[in-house]
Image (cartoon, rainbow, N blue to C red):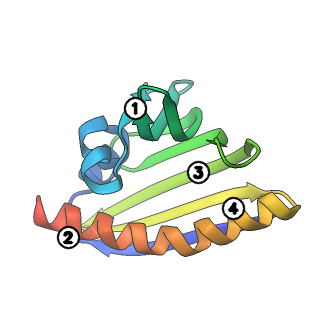
């Protein structure tokens, strides 16, 4: 199966890295997430939405937290992408690992489980292009707000 992987080093704690993926306000600041329902526990829901209007939501990603340690890992399984423009795509996995040493954190992000087909190919290409850019924004956000 295809996957998208990004590794980046950030001048911050590993706890802040994981917090930035689980705190709705922080998700809004660095990723533009407008609504979130996140239960920070194994088996908890992880749901984030963009382009929220009175008529609905433009994009939603949702899954179940399989692993959670606020200092080092967030693993989401049964991760599904929902859009008003495309068929629902899933299930996938999204893994965020943070390893800190002396105030510098190495972040590893992997989104995998992409299937085959036109819509899957489109989504894989979009994510492959987006995650590196988004992770640069993420790094900038965390280092500025450190």
> How many circles with numbers are drawn on the protein?
4
- State the residue at coordinates (73%, 41%): 88
Q: Residue at x 55, y 53 (%)?
A: 95
Residue 27's label in the rendered image is none
- In terms of secondary structure, where does tag 4 sit? helix
Kindly report which numbered mark, 3 or 1, lies closer to the viewer in this rendering.
Answer: 1
Residue 121, position as x, y percentages in the image? 78, 67
Q: Which residue is mark 4?
A: 123
User: Spatial distance from mark 2 to mark 3, Cα to Cα?
Assistant: 23 Å
Q: Secondary structure at mark 3?
A: strand
Q: Position of residue 131 (x, y in %)?
A: 50, 68
* Residue 52, quarter of picture: top left
Mark number displayed over residue 36: 1
Say which label, 3 or 1, has the lower sequence index. 1
The answer to which image quadrant residue 5 occupies is bottom right
- The circle drawn on residue 11 is 2
Q: Residues within 10 Å of mark 2 (few under 14, many from 20)?
A: some
Q: CA distance from mark 4 to mark 1?
A: 22 Å
Q: Is residue 13 at all visible to an observer of this figure?
A: yes
**SS class of the residue under badge 1?**
strand
Where does label 3 land, which residue? 94
Which residue does the image show at 55% across and 45% down from the upper left? 75
């Amino acid at each position: 199966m295809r996957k998208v992987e990004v590794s980046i080093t950030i001048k911050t704690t590993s706890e802040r890295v994981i917090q930035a993926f689980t705190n709705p306000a922080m998700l809004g600041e660095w990723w533009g997430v407008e609504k979130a329902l996140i239960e920070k526990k194994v088996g908890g829901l992880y749901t984030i939405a963009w382009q929220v209007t009175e008529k609905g939501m433009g994009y939603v990603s949702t899954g179940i937290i399989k692993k959670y340690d606020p200092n080092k890992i967030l693993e989401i399984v049964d991760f599904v992408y929902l859009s008003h423009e495309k068929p629902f795509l899933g299930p996938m996995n999204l893994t965020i690992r943070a390893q800190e040493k002396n105030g510098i954190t190495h972040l590893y992000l992997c989104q995998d489980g992409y299937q085959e087909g036109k819509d899957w190919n489109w989504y894989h290409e979009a994510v492959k292009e987006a995650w590196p850019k988004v992770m640069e924004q993420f790094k900038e956000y965390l280092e500025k707000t450190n």
